[in-house]
Image (cartoon, coloured by chain):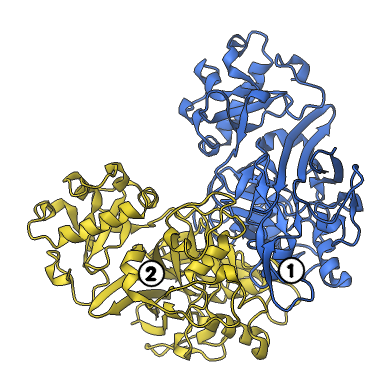
Chain colours: A yellow, B blue
Amino acid sequence: MTNAACWVPIPKNSDFSIHNIPFGIFSDSNATKRIGIAIGNHILDLAAAAKVGVFDAISVDKGVFTSEFLNPFIELGKATTSAIRRTVQQELTKEDSVLRKEESVLISKDNATLHLPVFIRDYTDFYSSIEHATNVGTMFRDPDKALLPNWKHLPVGYHGRASSIVVSGHDVHRPMGQTMPPDAEQPVYGPSKRVDFELEMGFIIGRQTTLGETLNTTKAEDYIFGKVLLNDWSARDVQKWEYVPLGPFLAKSFASHISPWVVTMEALEPFRVAGPTQDPKVLPYLEYTGQKNYDINLEVALQPEGAEKTVVCKSNFKYMYWNMVQQLTHHTMNGCNINVGDMMASGTISGKSEDSYGSMLELAWAGSKPVQLNDGSERKFIEDNDTVIMRGFCEKDGVRVGFGEVKAKILPAK
Amino acid sequence: MTNAACWVPIPKNSDFSIHNIPFGIFSDSNATKRIGIAIGNHILDLAAAAKVGVFDAISVDKGVFTSEFLNPFIELGKATTSAIRRTVQQELTKEDSVLRKEESVLISKDNATLHLPVFIRDYTDFYSSIEHATNVGTMFRDPDKALLPNWKHLPVGYHGRASSIVVSGHDVHRPMGQTMPPDAEQPVYGPSKRVDFELEMGFIIGRQTTLGETLNTTKAEDYIFGKVLLNDWSARDVQKWEYVPLGPFLAKSFASHISPWVVTMEALEPFRVAGPTQDPKVLPYLEYTGQKNYDINLEVALQPEGAEKTVVCKSNFKYMYWNMVQQLTHHTMNGCNINVGDMMASGTISGKSEDSYGSMLELAWAGSKPVQLNDGSERKFIEDNDTVIMRGFCEKDGVRVGFGEVKAKILPAK
């Protein structure tokens, strides 16, 4: 299976190669939301493909392809969704595929609108990059005790707001909030002055558990459907004032953006790598075997209004200290039930070098080292009308599997 | 309108008087989940009532009454749901009501199963009882600085887990968890040793906002549909080890129980009272006029297996420092969107006296003053097979409006 064998043209370096086949929700001149896969610069309409019979050998109700979210599709289970994905790959590389004769099945991505791919039932955000947690601890606490005592024993996480997760391209206004300015005696209400991005990835739950059920690190992998890019926007000044003792709240819930295509774990399989050594040893319920990290190149670009963009961060998902299998196992160990469509996020993904930090807070070191942009301006945090663009891709032995981008502009406060 | 005029018998002191008419989801020998109202010891089947035409004067699709959650019903809007509630009151007090001739519309509550009334989209838990926050601060921090600096300036809250909210009667197992025992050097994994209840009330959102929209304290009231009792179970030892810096996580998400009947804000209208004086003055966006607290008597009973129950706490919702209107306004001030079916909870509702504290943590003062039970045993926290029963009701001028109960047993860890 090669890109060259695919009868849909695939530009060089396209994230959406024949090896990827990610799932998403789109609409076009036909406003009905439906399921598509991305291939090169096109979208294959799975509802239309089903109509011409390509999935007839798979036991699946065709109605599922016109769902407005991927959830009912994911609920079919990995055996079915994998078979559909493989069938798409076969059809797209088959000279005489019936799909080739049906013009309506292939839509140029320029003619389509992409929507939030998943109804996110519950959203959990972890804090699993040791580089990020160390940076934050160094800035705000003691550099010699940057990590809190629990950090290396469990994947620290918190429940996030699901309603305000939106898809790439949905611009949002700078949030209003209550903050305590430095040296002030009374808090003030006004636009946040420290809006920041957080470079994260989310994984989408593919299989539900019931209340009281627990997973282990072997079983957990089967409950993960795929991954997306996530910009977990943060209002740092709001966060600082509100977060003790119950954690981040309004500092996070004004918006979180995800990329529109859910890349399956099958597509990511070739990019597994070993994670960092965990020292001290974790408790037995968190032990795992095998390679559970993934080599996914990540970058963040910042684009002021009307100016060119500047790449401000290059990081990689492989740096994660706690892997997804450990996060999910930990999440269910108290019996908390998970549902198809839940999203669990990594936390900010920082690397070891200063240009790999996944937030402005770290890149500009709490405002002490402004980030230089290509247009000559500098940034401590995100300014009005700045657009933040995150991209991610895997590449190995000539095979590229990417996530496209998650992009959003911060409009001035209302 | 009096109970005496109601042709369904209403026992003295019933929570479900003619003045109440709360909405819930039930099933009986007919397993289809549908909407009912509670009246005395009976349930009026609204789907059956609609079929015989009692709601014909109200523009409503009858299919809404066979929803498995109240959400589509609540989405009709208060004008419609209030009209339906008033019509039910009229029919139940009309001698020649057509409902009287239809035996199938009235089900004895003994023959019915009550279900989770609402699909809870997002769940937020506040921390708005000054007595509770002061008790916790006194126990774990400095009694002279028990409240954290932000507490009197904003309603502190956090995002909770929605998936594990279940209805009264759904027994749950003691959660497993990671804890750091006192004086230990390494954390351990095992059943939580400090399972606790939290006496709370939740309010259900009745109207959605879009991302970026903010409410004010005048408008917010119109977005609240009704209220339920909530037992926000907490594993104190898990919480202590996990919660810094991102807040409570698995300590809370093993289960939260709500009462099955949603009592409308219309039914609670006669029980409005003024809230406590807020000093220092709150920021203008949190100022409000009118009476926004409610006089709701609350109690918690603890029942060991096979023994009689002991009332361990008598509190009242009127003590809340931050009211619902302030909580909801604050929640939307950053543009976070709310949806019909969201639940926002009060936080533990403690009163001023030692017998009014809303958790075992406070009642037994972190284990230092065990609570005596009627069967001669004592409790610092909840033991295996203990059942916790919370009740709530309003009473004034002979009118009683109650919530029934929320009840659940803690089974041994699996």
Tag 2 secondary structure: strand
Q: Which one is closest to the eye, mark 2 or mark 1?
A: 2
Under mark 1, the amino acid is Asn
Residue A80 image point, x, y percent: 31, 51
In screen coordinates, is B368 left or right of A413?
right
The subunit carrying tag 2 is: A
Q: Quadrant of residue A263?
A: bottom left
Classify residue B272 as left or right of residue A129. right
Q: What residue is disc 2 on?
A: A406
Q: Position of residue A254 (x, y in %)?
A: 53, 63
What is the chain identity of the residue bearing mark 1?
B
> Is residue A396 placed above or below B225 in the rendered structure?
below
- Residue ID at (73%, 54%): B347
Question: Does A398 appear above or below B22?
Answer: below
Q: Secondary structure at mark 1?
A: loop
Give the amino acid type for the residue marked by disc 2 in the picture. Answer: Val
Disc 1 crowd, CA 10 A, few/some/many (<14, 14-19, 20+): some
Q: Specify the quadrant of the image occupied by residue B115.
A: top right
- Compared with B20, B117 (above or below) is below
Instruction: For label 2, count other residues whose C-alpha is less than 10 Å away and answer few (under 14), some (14-19) or many (20+).
Output: many
Residue B74: x and y in percent read 55, 37
Q: B207 and B188: which one is in front? A: B188
Quarter of the N terminus of chain B within the rendering: top right
Residue B297: percent from left, percent from top: 82, 40
The residue nearer to you, when weighing A390 against A377, is A390
**A197 left or right of B272?**
left
Residue that carries the numbered disc 1 in the rendered image: B150
Is A410 positioned to the left or the right of A141 in the image? Answer: left
| Residue at (47, 85) in percent of width and height | A351
Which residue is painted at 84% across and 39% down in the image? B307
**Residue B217 or residue B204, whichever sits in front:** B204
**Cα–Cα span, label 2 and label 1:** 34 Å
